[in-house]
Amino acid sequence: MENQPKTVKFLKFDRIQVFNFFFFGILLFLLYQLLKILSPFLGAILIAGTLAMIFYPVHLWIKSRVTSNNNLAPAVSTVSVLLTVVMPLLVFGWLLFKESKEIYPKTNQWLSNFSQAGLHLQVPEGFRSIWDLDARDIILGNVKNLQESIMKSGGTILKNIFFFFASFLVIIATLFVFFRDGERLLHWLIDIIPMDAEHKYRIANQLYITAIAVVRGFLLTAAVQGIMGSIGYALAGVPAPILFGVLTSFAALIPFVGTSVIWLPLGIAFIFIKGLPTGLFILLWGALVVGLLDNILRPIFIGQKAKLPIFLLFLGIFGGLRVYGPIGILMGPLLISCLIVFLQIYKETKNLEQKTG
């Protein structure tokens, strides 16, 4: 038999398939370019979206009781958020950055004065040899590292002062838009997603619950840390323990350094003011009680509200913090929550297909 030529089959696409490939290819390209354009302000947009979700009930109250004007009500709500949350945090951050310049010089001066005096009044006899060898270098090293961390974060803002103010303006503008058109934009976004309506609203609801749970978890954890800090400061005889407790709560919201901004310098200072036992008590209370509450309570508070496994939530918070920076605190739990919902939907769809098949 003669060898017959083999026919090569080519894939054939109809016009609809070609249009779909072309359309979605261009759409993905445009979305990628839009993401690149918005990437410098993604943190600001995420902060504005989170604040809008938290204060949206307040906005509805303002719209029903104060003014129903479509532009005035969002403006009043935006100003309320700025006065309640944003401005106090900016003032606290500026004061922290300003005061951090004096941490290392003052500590070094205190140590020099007490070294010249021989530390006979405050340091017990058994600790003097240890102090002379290591403690001075250890304390100065830790204080300098703390100062450098604060100065580095503040210096980054000062170097990029234009982007800082641009991000601040983006937060204000995005808050206003979310208060005025957020509900309409959310429904529009949900409608264009190519999924069943039940699944879309289920995912949106889970993301909303998780975002609120993360924010509330952080606020509750910061409040408990402030209360425990006040108790420790009162036991140590610190003047105005409630004031330092409030400062500890604010500091708990600062990524990376957290409450150590308050209890670390305070404990070091009280080593010289009231003696080594009192200062060590503040340092141990801050590290073992106030500091560890962050790692214990936060996943519990968030996990109970968001209905997420505590272990995965723990990894999501700290993994997100490492990968995405400060916004990863919110991004990590949101990604885990979204992944779990998608897996649940896939499992339910697969079981339904098996039953109907």
Image (cartoon, helix red, strand yellow):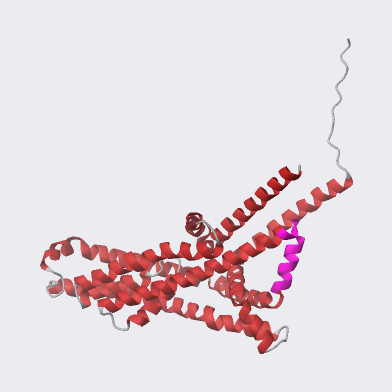
Q: Is residue 52 visible?
A: yes
Q: Compared with residue 13, is residue 165 higher up or lower down, i.e. above or below?
A: below
Q: Magenta stretch containing residue 183, yes or no?
A: yes
Is 332 inside the magenta-drawn segment? no
* Front one among 66 and 128: 66
Residue at point 57%, 64% (across, down)? 210
State the residue in front, 322 or 113: 322
Magenta span main SS:
helix
Rendered location of residue 19, percent (x, y): 84, 50
The residue sitting at 44% across, 70% down in the picture is 221
Q: Name the quadrant of the C terminus.
A: top right
Q: Is residue 38 visible?
A: no
> What's drawn in magenta, residue-wise?
182-198
Q: Position of residue 285 (x, y in %)?
A: 30, 69
Give the image location of residue 236, x and y in percent.
26, 76
Considering every residue shown, the one lying at the far bottom of the view is 66
Pick whichever, 353 or 173, lies toward us.
353
Give the residue displayed 61% in from the left and 54% down from the top.
Answer: 339
Q: Is residue 327 left or right of residue 353?
A: left
